[in-house]
Image (cartoon, grey):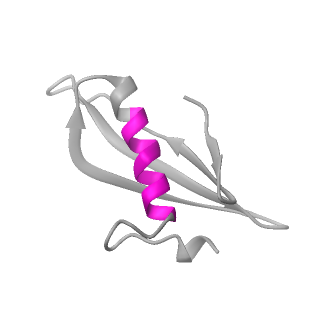
Amino acid sequence: MAGIKYRGFIITPNSKQLPETGEWSINVLIKKHHESESVVCPYSLEQTLPTKREAERTSCRLGMDIINGRVPGCSVAVLI
């Protein structure tokens, strides 16, 4: 899945299949472009999901929730 633009950021799911279980991780990269550089931060959950599609969708929702300040302990302040 390609990155999506959301409120001035680019959210890119980065899910990986775990060889031990075959399930997919919930990982997301959030990028912010500035005039001379881009800053990227990774975020993840310990939860796994059975399909890549579910993991990618959940990763995108996680990114949106982080940007909206809805995930305790996660912030995009370092990207701004």
In percent of width and height, residue 10 lies at 63, 50
Q: Residue furthest right?
A: 35
Residue at x-position 62% and y-position 56%: 31
Q: Is residue 59 shown left or right of residue 50?
A: right
Magenta residues: mostly which secondary structure?
A: helix
Q: Is residue 42 magenta?
A: no
Residue for point 55% across, 55% down: 30
Q: In screen coordinates, is 37 left or right of 6?
A: right
Question: Does 58 appear above or below 7?
Answer: above
35 over 56 or under it: above or below: below
From the viewer's perspective, is residue 30 above or below residue 75?
above
Residue 1, placed above or below residue 71:
above
Quarter occupied by residue 52: top left
Q: Nearer the viewer, residue 69 or 48?
A: 69
Q: Position of residue 9 (x, y in %)?
A: 65, 57
Residue 62 colored in magenta in the image: yes
Q: Bounds of the magenta span?
A: 56-67
Examine the image and state in which quarter residue 72 appears: bottom left
Nearest the eye: 46 or 69: 69
Percent x, y of residue 68: 49, 65
Q: Is residue 72 left or right of residue 80?
A: left
Q: Residue farthest to the left?
A: 21
Q: Quadrant of residue 39?
A: bottom right
What's the residue at 83%, 67% (across, down)?
Answer: 36
Q: Position of residue 33 (x, y in %)?
A: 74, 61
